[in-house]
Image (cartoon, grey):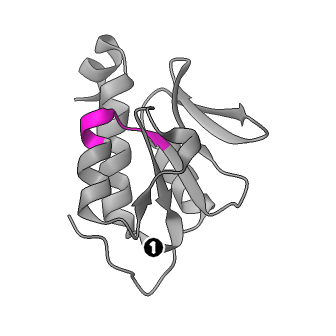
Amino acid sequence: MRARKSSKRLTSDDARLLLLALPGVEEGPCYGTPGWRVKKRFLARLKEDGETLVVKVGDEERDILLAADPEVFFLTPHYFGYPTVLIRLPKIRKPLLAEVLQRAWRRLAPKGLLERAT
């Protein structure tokens, strides 16, 4: 699961397109930055630096990601105790970001939406 730098650095636009491709995901403001929700449930938001994505992944997934590659996945003290992980977009490869977002979406999407998506 190691995320290595690719020749193309991912941007917030790349993350936005991946998020909006997930069924039922809507974009809207979140603490003054772009945010994404699935059926009104927080999924992700862009941090003020424009290069960090906060994703609600669950406690277990968060711990796995943090251990797998701390250069890509990290926390700040503000997020300690929350089921979220911060992602350095320029350091992650697109396929891995898509996988992380898909798993996060599956955790939050209502059953009916999950059934329609498969």
Relative depth, front residue between 95 and 86: 86
What residue is at 74 percent from the left and 35 percent from the top? 31
Residue 59 on the magenta segment? yes
Q: Which quarter shows the C terminus?
A: top left
Percent x, y of residue 5: 39, 81
Relative depth, front residue between 111 and 92: 92
State the SS at label 1: helix
Identify residue type, mark 1.
Lys
Instruction: Decide: few, some or many residues near mark 1? Use Cα within 10 Å; few <14, some 14-19, many ≥20.
Output: many
Tag 1 residue: 91
Residue 44 on the magenta segment? no
Percent x, y of residue 26: 59, 30
What residue is at 56 percent from the left and 18 percent from the top? 40
Q: Which quarter shows the N terminus?
A: bottom left
What residue is at 40 percent from the left and 70 percent from the top? 71
Task: Give the residues in magenta.
Answer: 55-61
- Is residue 54 depicted above or below 105 in this figure? below
